Amino acid sequence: MHQLVVLGNVLLAVVLTAYACQAQHTGGDDLRPAPSVGQTHLSRAVQRARQYGVDSTFLAGVLQAPGTAFDEKYVRINVTNYASKPDYSFNLTPQSVEKVRGFLVKHDSLLRRADSMYGVPKEVVASLLWVESKHGVVLGKNHVASVYLSTLLASDDEYVDKNTASVMSTQKIDSSKVDSVRSAIRKRAERKVRWSVEQLKALQEIQRRRTMNVHTLNGSWAGAFGMPQFIPSSYLSWAADGNNDGIIDLNDLNDAVVSVANYLRKNGWGPAESQQRAAVHHYNNSNAYVDCVLTLAAKVTEQPAAQPRQ
């Protein structure tokens, strides 16, 4: 095991050296380009991930993947999104209700089976999948590993300052409150760094199990993927095999439906409204999100209004 660790460290060092190599002569007037700011930041993020205990061999593989890149937007949105009130009302339109009803009819057998296994109503599972990914239509194009590597730098002074300025500006906060905003941003950034480390380690484990290729995995700006939009640690904890093929693929409808039901059940779903709200809140810690999912589930069970006779 010690030899593997040493080899991993050597491999990562080689990749980092090649990746962030400074401009140097290659003969005549030919110069290798200096690394961009993004390359420099990504190298720093990878080194930091290693310091937090993420495996060197895994990181070397991620760094060599074509989609891996540092992107400042992940550092911003994953830290500052708390300052904006979420709005999920667009999921409650008549068109959305009809889409969920159609989904319930089309996949009735699967949804009933999940209900019988976990005690989570089919309307709730179908509604949650609509809110998360429009039943698999909107899955996200963000490179998941890059989301977490980028967010590892959130607690750097550079990004604490930038995110403080962003919140002050977008929320039109008086300049006298800048110190309290900066303090809140720094605390949130430190939590997001720990969160990013946890998710990178979860990706590392997923890659080790070979259930999917995390080097090419895309998802949301928060690093969530598949129809149910699980983050990596949620995948390891609550994703379930819905068709008994030995592979848990969250882009497979059988696995997605059963995984949502299993998630909610394992996180407290029960007959009481308080239990149901708590379970959905664990999925997304926003009361607006909870209201949206449960309201949509209630709407799809209502009888459609009778059409007037011609």
Image: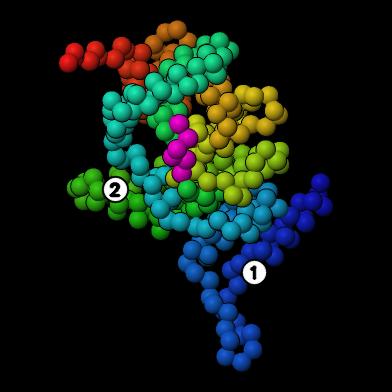
Please tell me which residue is depicted at 64% across the width and 31% down the height of the picture: 248
Frontmost residue, 239 versus 169: 239
Helix, strand or loop at label 1? It is helix
Please tell me which residue is depicted at 41% across the width and 23% down the height of the picture: 102
Identify which amino acid the numbered label 2 is placed on.
Val
Q: How many marks?
A: 2
Helix, strand or loop at label 2? It is helix
Frontmost residue, 308 versus 298: 308
The answer to whether any part of residue 153 appears in the image is yes
State the scheme by which the image is colored: rainbow
Frontmost residue, 169 versus 127: 127
Frontmost residue, 50 versus 270: 270
Q: Which residue is mark 2?
A: 167
Residue 6: x and y, percent? 77, 55
Residue 227: x and y, percent? 50, 33
Q: Which residue is mark 1?
A: 18
Instruction: Sort mark 1 into few (<14), some (14-19) or many (20+) by Cα contacts within 10 Å.
Output: few
Per the picture, the main secondary structure of the magenta-coloured stretch is loop
Q: Do tag 1 and tag 2 residues touch (Cβ < 8 Å)?
A: no
In the image, the segment drawn in magenta is: 135-140
Residue 223: x and y, percent? 50, 42
User: 111 left or right of 15?
Assistant: left
Q: Is residue 62 above or below residue 125?
A: below
Q: Residue furthest bottom?
A: 28
How far apart are the two marked residues, 1 and 2, measured between alpha carbons? 37 Å
Instruction: Sort mark 2 into few (<14), some (14-19) or many (20+) by Cα contacts within 10 Å.
Output: many
Identify which amino acid the numbered label 1 is placed on.
Ala
Q: Residue 138 colored magenta?
A: yes
- Please report whichever mark, 1 or 2, sits nearer to the chain's N-terminal start: 1
Q: Is residue 132 above or below residue 29?
A: above
Q: Residue 192 colored magenta?
A: no
